[in-house]
Image (cartoon, helix red, strand yellow):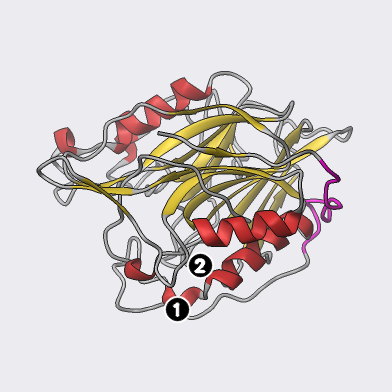
Amino acid sequence: MLVAVHRPAGTQPPPGPPLSDPGNTVPPTSSDPSRPLLRRRALLGAAAGALLLALVPGVRHGVTALAGQQDDGPWLTVATWNTCGIDAWGCTPFGDGKAKADTLVALAEQHGARVLLLQEACEGDAEAARQRLGADWHLALQPYEQLDATGARTPVDCGADRGRAGYGVLAAAPLTGTTPVAAPQPATGLQRGALCTTPGHGPRICAAHLSLPPADRSDRAAELRDDQLAALLAAAGDGAVLGGDFNARPPGPGNRDSWIWPTAYYDRVQECEQRTPGSPGRPGPTHDNGEKLDYLFTALPRHGCRIVDTGASDHRALLLTVPGSL
Protein backbone atom coordinates (compact mmCIF):
# COMPACT_ATOMS: atom_id res chain seq x y z
CA MET A 1 0.00 0.00 0.00
CA LEU A 2 1.38 3.38 -1.01
CA VAL A 3 0.77 6.42 1.14
CA ALA A 4 1.40 9.85 -0.39
CA VAL A 5 2.33 12.90 1.64
CA HIS A 6 1.29 16.22 0.08
CA ARG A 7 1.83 19.81 1.04
CA PRO A 8 -0.15 22.91 -0.04
CA ALA A 9 1.38 24.95 -2.83
CA GLY A 10 3.78 27.74 -1.91
CA THR A 11 6.93 29.38 -3.06
CA GLN A 12 9.80 27.29 -4.36
CA PRO A 13 13.35 27.62 -3.06
CA PRO A 14 15.71 29.40 -5.47
CA PRO A 15 17.26 27.19 -8.15
CA GLY A 16 20.79 25.99 -7.58
CA PRO A 17 23.82 26.70 -9.76
CA PRO A 18 23.82 25.51 -13.39
CA LEU A 19 24.70 21.86 -13.80
CA SER A 20 27.96 22.75 -15.53
CA ASP A 21 29.25 24.56 -12.40
CA PRO A 22 32.12 22.39 -11.07
CA GLY A 23 32.15 23.83 -7.55
CA ASN A 24 30.78 22.82 -4.16
CA THR A 25 32.83 19.66 -3.77
CA VAL A 26 32.38 17.83 -0.49
CA PRO A 27 35.08 15.24 0.36
CA PRO A 28 33.89 11.71 1.13
CA THR A 29 33.98 10.31 4.63
CA SER A 30 35.98 7.21 5.40
CA SER A 31 34.24 3.95 4.55
CA ASP A 32 33.75 0.95 6.82
CA PRO A 33 36.20 -1.76 5.66
CA SER A 34 34.07 -4.49 7.22
CA ARG A 35 31.36 -4.00 4.58
CA PRO A 36 31.08 -6.37 1.61
CA LEU A 37 32.83 -4.96 -1.49
CA LEU A 38 29.75 -4.73 -3.69
CA ARG A 39 27.53 -2.87 -1.23
CA ARG A 40 29.63 -2.42 1.93
CA ARG A 41 26.69 -3.19 4.04
CA ALA A 42 24.67 -6.19 5.09
CA LEU A 43 21.84 -7.58 3.00
CA LEU A 44 19.03 -5.14 2.39
CA GLY A 45 15.26 -5.37 3.25
CA ALA A 46 12.00 -5.31 1.21
CA ALA A 47 9.42 -2.85 -0.16
CA ALA A 48 5.68 -2.69 0.66
CA GLY A 49 3.37 -0.32 2.43
CA ALA A 50 3.50 3.51 2.96
CA LEU A 51 5.28 6.62 1.58
CA LEU A 52 8.10 8.69 3.10
CA LEU A 53 10.13 11.86 2.35
CA ALA A 54 13.73 13.16 1.85
CA LEU A 55 16.52 15.59 0.42
CA VAL A 56 21.11 16.08 -0.30
CA PRO A 57 25.08 18.29 -0.90
CA GLY A 58 28.76 18.23 -2.88
CA VAL A 59 30.41 17.67 -6.58
CA ARG A 60 33.02 15.24 -7.71
CA HIS A 61 32.70 14.40 -11.36
CA GLY A 62 30.87 16.38 -14.01
CA VAL A 63 29.78 15.64 -17.57
CA THR A 64 28.42 18.32 -19.87
CA ALA A 65 27.88 18.78 -23.62
CA LEU A 66 25.99 15.51 -23.83
CA ALA A 67 24.22 14.17 -26.89
CA GLY A 68 21.00 16.08 -27.44
CA GLN A 69 22.19 19.14 -25.52
CA GLN A 70 20.11 22.26 -26.08
CA ASP A 71 20.75 25.77 -24.82
CA ASP A 72 17.20 27.01 -24.45
CA GLY A 73 15.11 26.20 -21.36
CA PRO A 74 13.28 25.60 -19.24
CA TRP A 75 15.39 22.84 -17.70
CA LEU A 76 14.59 20.41 -14.92
CA THR A 77 17.27 18.79 -12.73
CA VAL A 78 16.54 15.28 -11.45
CA ALA A 79 18.76 13.59 -8.86
CA THR A 80 19.05 10.08 -7.47
CA TRP A 81 20.71 9.34 -4.13
CA ASN A 82 21.01 6.28 -1.91
CA THR A 83 21.17 7.99 1.49
CA CYS A 84 22.54 4.95 3.39
CA GLY A 85 20.31 5.79 6.33
CA ILE A 86 19.85 2.41 8.02
CA ASP A 87 22.02 1.77 11.07
CA ALA A 88 21.65 -2.02 10.86
CA TRP A 89 23.01 -1.98 7.31
CA GLY A 90 26.33 -0.47 8.38
CA CYS A 91 25.50 3.15 7.65
CA THR A 92 26.47 4.77 10.96
CA PRO A 93 29.90 5.88 9.65
CA PHE A 94 28.13 8.11 7.13
CA GLY A 95 26.38 10.46 9.53
CA ASP A 96 23.14 10.78 11.45
CA GLY A 97 19.67 11.83 10.38
CA LYS A 98 20.56 15.52 10.42
CA ALA A 99 23.43 14.88 8.00
CA LYS A 100 21.03 13.12 5.62
CA ALA A 101 18.46 15.93 5.82
CA ASP A 102 21.15 18.59 5.38
CA THR A 103 22.41 16.80 2.27
CA LEU A 104 18.94 16.50 0.76
CA VAL A 105 18.31 20.21 1.32
CA ALA A 106 21.68 21.05 -0.24
CA LEU A 107 20.96 18.93 -3.32
CA ALA A 108 17.80 20.95 -3.82
CA GLU A 109 18.96 24.43 -2.82
CA GLN A 110 22.63 24.39 -3.86
CA HIS A 111 22.52 21.99 -6.81
CA GLY A 112 19.07 22.84 -8.16
CA ALA A 113 17.48 19.39 -7.96
CA ARG A 114 13.69 19.71 -8.20
CA VAL A 115 13.05 15.96 -8.20
CA LEU A 116 14.99 13.46 -6.05
CA LEU A 117 14.83 9.68 -6.39
CA LEU A 118 15.63 8.19 -2.98
CA GLN A 119 16.84 4.83 -1.72
CA GLU A 120 17.53 3.73 1.87
CA ALA A 121 15.87 6.91 3.09
CA CYS A 122 14.46 7.24 6.60
CA GLU A 123 11.01 8.70 7.22
CA GLY A 124 12.26 11.13 9.84
CA ASP A 125 15.21 12.37 7.77
CA ALA A 126 13.11 12.84 4.66
CA GLU A 127 10.32 14.63 6.48
CA ALA A 128 12.78 16.97 8.16
CA ALA A 129 14.27 17.89 4.80
CA ARG A 130 10.88 18.31 3.16
CA GLN A 131 9.71 20.67 5.87
CA ARG A 132 12.84 22.76 5.51
CA LEU A 133 12.41 22.97 1.74
CA GLY A 134 8.93 24.38 2.06
CA ALA A 135 5.29 23.86 1.21
CA ASP A 136 5.86 23.08 -2.49
CA TRP A 137 7.67 19.86 -1.69
CA HIS A 138 5.89 16.50 -1.70
CA LEU A 139 7.02 12.97 -1.00
CA ALA A 140 6.08 9.40 -1.94
CA LEU A 141 8.07 6.73 -0.08
CA GLN A 142 7.61 2.97 -0.16
CA PRO A 143 8.91 1.11 2.92
CA TYR A 144 11.24 -1.85 2.64
CA GLU A 145 10.01 -5.06 4.23
CA GLN A 146 11.55 -8.33 5.29
CA LEU A 147 9.44 -11.28 4.14
CA ASP A 148 9.77 -14.54 6.07
CA ALA A 149 8.88 -18.11 5.09
CA THR A 150 5.42 -17.80 6.66
CA GLY A 151 4.56 -14.75 4.57
CA ALA A 152 4.89 -12.30 7.46
CA ARG A 153 6.26 -8.88 6.53
CA THR A 154 8.32 -6.72 8.86
CA PRO A 155 9.22 -3.10 8.01
CA VAL A 156 12.88 -2.13 8.06
CA ASP A 157 13.59 0.34 10.85
CA CYS A 158 16.30 2.98 10.44
CA GLY A 159 17.15 3.08 14.14
CA ALA A 160 17.64 6.07 16.44
CA ASP A 161 13.89 6.86 16.28
CA ARG A 162 14.15 7.89 12.60
CA GLY A 163 11.27 5.72 11.45
CA ARG A 164 10.99 3.21 8.65
CA ALA A 165 13.36 3.01 5.69
CA GLY A 166 12.22 3.07 2.07
CA TYR A 167 12.67 4.24 -1.51
CA GLY A 168 10.66 6.84 -3.39
CA VAL A 169 10.48 10.34 -4.82
CA LEU A 170 10.73 13.81 -3.29
CA ALA A 171 9.74 16.66 -5.59
CA ALA A 172 8.95 20.37 -5.63
CA ALA A 173 5.39 19.79 -6.88
CA PRO A 174 2.39 17.60 -6.05
CA LEU A 175 2.83 13.93 -6.96
CA THR A 176 0.05 12.27 -8.93
CA GLY A 177 -0.51 8.81 -10.35
CA THR A 178 1.87 7.21 -7.86
CA THR A 179 1.93 3.47 -8.49
CA PRO A 180 4.25 0.57 -7.61
CA VAL A 181 6.03 -1.24 -10.43
CA ALA A 182 5.12 -4.92 -10.54
CA ALA A 183 8.33 -6.96 -10.72
CA PRO A 184 9.67 -10.19 -9.20
CA GLN A 185 11.09 -10.05 -5.67
CA PRO A 186 12.86 -12.72 -3.59
CA ALA A 187 10.64 -15.48 -2.18
CA THR A 188 11.94 -14.55 1.27
CA GLY A 189 14.16 -11.81 2.61
CA LEU A 190 14.42 -8.15 1.73
CA GLN A 191 11.76 -6.80 -0.62
CA ARG A 192 13.04 -3.82 -2.60
CA GLY A 193 11.13 -2.44 -5.58
CA ALA A 194 10.20 0.54 -7.73
CA LEU A 195 7.46 3.14 -8.05
CA CYS A 196 6.43 5.68 -10.68
CA THR A 197 4.87 9.10 -10.11
CA THR A 198 4.31 12.41 -11.92
CA PRO A 199 5.47 15.61 -10.20
CA GLY A 200 3.35 18.60 -11.22
CA HIS A 201 3.48 19.10 -14.98
CA GLY A 202 6.86 17.43 -15.27
CA PRO A 203 7.89 14.11 -16.84
CA ARG A 204 6.93 10.76 -15.39
CA ILE A 205 9.51 9.72 -12.76
CA CYS A 206 10.28 6.11 -11.88
CA ALA A 207 12.51 5.35 -8.90
CA ALA A 208 13.94 1.88 -8.28
CA HIS A 209 16.09 -0.07 -5.88
CA LEU A 210 16.92 -3.41 -7.48
CA SER A 211 17.75 -6.69 -5.81
CA LEU A 212 21.28 -7.92 -5.16
CA PRO A 213 22.64 -10.52 -7.59
CA PRO A 214 22.33 -14.19 -6.61
CA ALA A 215 25.25 -15.80 -4.78
CA ASP A 216 25.70 -18.13 -7.76
CA ARG A 217 26.02 -15.85 -10.78
CA SER A 218 25.70 -18.83 -13.12
CA ASP A 219 22.18 -19.52 -11.81
CA ARG A 220 20.27 -17.27 -14.19
CA ALA A 221 16.93 -18.54 -12.94
CA ALA A 222 17.75 -17.01 -9.55
CA GLU A 223 18.63 -13.62 -11.07
CA LEU A 224 15.90 -10.99 -10.59
CA ARG A 225 17.51 -7.79 -11.86
CA ASP A 226 16.90 -8.61 -15.55
CA ASP A 227 13.15 -8.85 -15.02
CA GLN A 228 13.18 -5.82 -12.70
CA LEU A 229 14.99 -3.70 -15.31
CA ALA A 230 12.52 -4.78 -18.00
CA ALA A 231 9.51 -4.04 -15.78
CA LEU A 232 10.88 -0.61 -14.83
CA LEU A 233 11.35 0.41 -18.46
CA ALA A 234 7.87 -0.83 -19.42
CA ALA A 235 6.24 1.02 -16.53
CA ALA A 236 8.06 4.28 -17.27
CA GLY A 237 6.82 4.69 -20.82
CA ASP A 238 7.97 7.38 -23.24
CA GLY A 239 9.32 10.70 -22.04
CA ALA A 240 10.08 9.53 -18.49
CA VAL A 241 13.15 9.74 -16.29
CA LEU A 242 13.91 6.45 -14.58
CA GLY A 243 16.71 5.38 -12.31
CA GLY A 244 17.95 4.69 -8.82
CA ASP A 245 20.28 2.18 -7.21
CA PHE A 246 20.37 -0.76 -9.62
CA ASN A 247 22.92 -2.86 -7.68
CA ALA A 248 24.51 -3.61 -11.05
CA ARG A 249 27.52 -2.51 -13.07
CA PRO A 250 27.00 -1.11 -16.60
CA PRO A 251 27.04 -3.67 -19.42
CA GLY A 252 30.33 -4.15 -21.19
CA PRO A 253 33.52 -6.21 -21.42
CA GLY A 254 34.49 -7.82 -18.16
CA ASN A 255 30.98 -7.67 -16.69
CA ARG A 256 29.61 -11.21 -16.53
CA ASP A 257 26.20 -9.80 -15.66
CA SER A 258 25.87 -7.73 -18.84
CA TRP A 259 23.13 -10.05 -20.03
CA ILE A 260 20.70 -8.70 -17.40
CA TRP A 261 20.41 -5.36 -19.26
CA PRO A 262 17.54 -5.16 -21.80
CA THR A 263 18.78 -3.84 -25.13
CA ALA A 264 16.66 -0.68 -24.86
CA TYR A 265 18.94 0.63 -22.11
CA TYR A 266 21.74 2.80 -23.54
CA ASP A 267 19.81 2.74 -26.83
CA ARG A 268 16.18 3.83 -26.67
CA VAL A 269 16.89 5.50 -23.33
CA GLN A 270 20.24 7.14 -22.65
CA GLU A 271 22.06 7.24 -19.30
CA CYS A 272 23.08 10.43 -17.54
CA GLU A 273 26.81 10.00 -18.20
CA GLN A 274 26.49 8.34 -21.61
CA ARG A 275 28.28 10.05 -24.50
CA THR A 276 28.15 7.43 -27.26
CA PRO A 277 24.84 6.01 -28.55
CA GLY A 278 24.51 2.32 -27.77
CA SER A 279 27.42 2.23 -25.34
CA PRO A 280 27.78 3.09 -21.63
CA GLY A 281 31.33 4.30 -22.27
CA ARG A 282 33.48 4.86 -19.17
CA PRO A 283 31.15 6.25 -16.49
CA GLY A 284 32.43 7.57 -13.19
CA PRO A 285 31.95 5.56 -9.99
CA THR A 286 28.92 6.28 -7.83
CA HIS A 287 29.84 3.98 -4.93
CA ASP A 288 32.77 3.84 -2.52
CA ASN A 289 33.77 0.46 -3.98
CA GLY A 290 34.72 2.25 -7.22
CA GLU A 291 31.77 0.94 -9.24
CA LYS A 292 28.85 2.65 -10.92
CA LEU A 293 25.67 1.33 -9.29
CA ASP A 294 23.38 4.39 -9.60
CA TYR A 295 21.68 5.47 -12.82
CA LEU A 296 19.37 7.99 -14.48
CA PHE A 297 17.96 7.08 -17.91
CA THR A 298 15.75 9.05 -20.29
CA ALA A 299 14.89 9.47 -23.96
CA LEU A 300 14.68 13.24 -23.40
CA PRO A 301 17.57 15.50 -24.46
CA ARG A 302 20.25 15.60 -21.77
CA HIS A 303 21.70 18.99 -20.94
CA GLY A 304 24.29 17.84 -18.40
CA CYS A 305 25.23 15.23 -15.82
CA ARG A 306 26.92 15.57 -12.45
CA ILE A 307 28.11 13.24 -9.71
CA VAL A 308 27.98 14.78 -6.24
CA ASP A 309 30.11 13.31 -3.46
CA THR A 310 28.08 14.23 -0.39
CA GLY A 311 30.21 12.63 2.31
CA ALA A 312 26.97 11.43 3.94
CA SER A 313 26.63 8.03 2.21
CA ASP A 314 28.66 5.31 0.56
CA HIS A 315 26.77 6.30 -2.62
CA ARG A 316 27.27 9.55 -4.48
CA ALA A 317 24.34 11.50 -5.81
CA LEU A 318 23.78 11.60 -9.57
CA LEU A 319 22.12 14.66 -11.16
CA LEU A 320 20.70 14.91 -14.68
CA THR A 321 19.20 17.98 -16.37
CA VAL A 322 16.49 17.54 -19.01
CA PRO A 323 13.98 19.86 -20.72
CA GLY A 324 10.94 20.61 -18.59
CA SER A 325 9.53 22.22 -15.51
CA LEU A 326 7.13 21.33 -12.72
User: Residue sitting at 68 percent across and 64 percent down?
Assistant: 59
Task: Give the side of residue 230 with respect to residue 134, left or right.
Answer: left
Q: Position of residue 116 (x, y in %)?
A: 62, 47
- Label 1: how many Cα within 10 Å (few below 14, some 14–19, many 20+): some
Kind of residue indicated by mark 1: Pro
Q: Main secondary structure of the magenta part?
A: loop
The span shown in magenta is: 10-22
Question: Would you name the residue on which mark 2 appears?
Answer: 313
Q: Is residue 313 above or below residue 240?
A: below
| Residue 31 is one of the magenta-drawn residues | no
User: Residue sitting at 82 percent across and 32 percent down?
Assistant: 70
Residue 287 seen from this side: yes
Mark 1: secondary structure: helix
Q: How many marks?
A: 2
Mark 2: secondary structure: loop
Task: Give the side of residue 223 with respect to residue 285, left or right.
Answer: left
Q: Position of residue 26 (x, y in %)?
A: 66, 73
Q: Residue 93: which numbered mark, if any?
A: 1
Q: Position of residue 187 (x, y in %)?
A: 16, 39
User: Mark 2 or 1 closer to N-term?
Assistant: 1
Q: Residue 264: which numbered mark, if any?
A: none
Kind of residue indicated by mark 2: Ser
Which residue is nearer to you in this view: 92 or 216? 92
| Residue 16 is one of the magenta-drawn residues | yes
Q: Position of residue 223 (x, y in %)?
A: 22, 38
